[in-house]
Image (cartoon, rainbow, N blue to C red):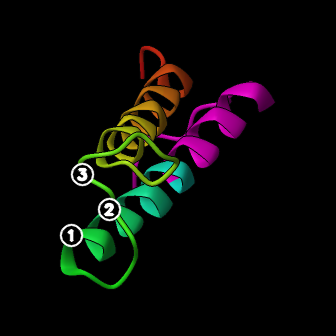
Amino acid sequence: MGRRTSRHPVQTFLIFSGIMVTAISGAYLAAGLAGLLPLQTETISWNNVRIVSGITILGCLMAAVGYGNE
């Protein structure tokens, strides 16, 4: 088993919400690239590939900030 540390509730929130944001936006990106969901590559809209990829990166950064120096 891993080392158990006591985290501040904000850190725990950042970790879990960051992982969820990454998973959801990553799944949307994969489905968009597979043609299952709309994914614009040319025009600026909410489902632009750059915006979806940026949200994935945001989720990764949220989780990284939550983990801190662990």
- Report which residue position mark 3 lands on: 41
Image position of 47 with respect to 58: above or below: below
Task: Indicate the position of residue 56 as horizontal and vertical percent values.
Answer: 39, 43
Q: Nearer the viewer, residue 10 or 45?
A: 45
Do the residues under discs 2 and 1 have CB atoms within 8 angstroms?
yes
Identify the element where label 3 is drawn: loop
Instruction: Quadrant for the C terminus, please.
Output: top left
Counting residues from the start of the chain, the first of labels 3 and 2 encountered is: 2
**Between marks 3 and 2 in the image, the one whose residue lies nearer the viewer:** 3
Task: Pick whichever, 61 or 69, lies toward us.
Answer: 61
Inter-mark Cα distance, 3 to 2: 11 Å
Kindly give the residue lying farthest to the bottom in the view shown: 36
Q: Which residues are magenta?
A: 1-19
Identify the amino acid type marked 1: Leu
Please give the label number shown on residue 33: 1
- The residue where tag 2 is placed is 29
**Residue 32 in which image quadrant:** bottom left
Q: Using a 10 Å C-alpha cutoff, classify the residue at mark 3 as few (fewer than 14 neighbours), some (14 to 19) or many (20 or more).
A: few
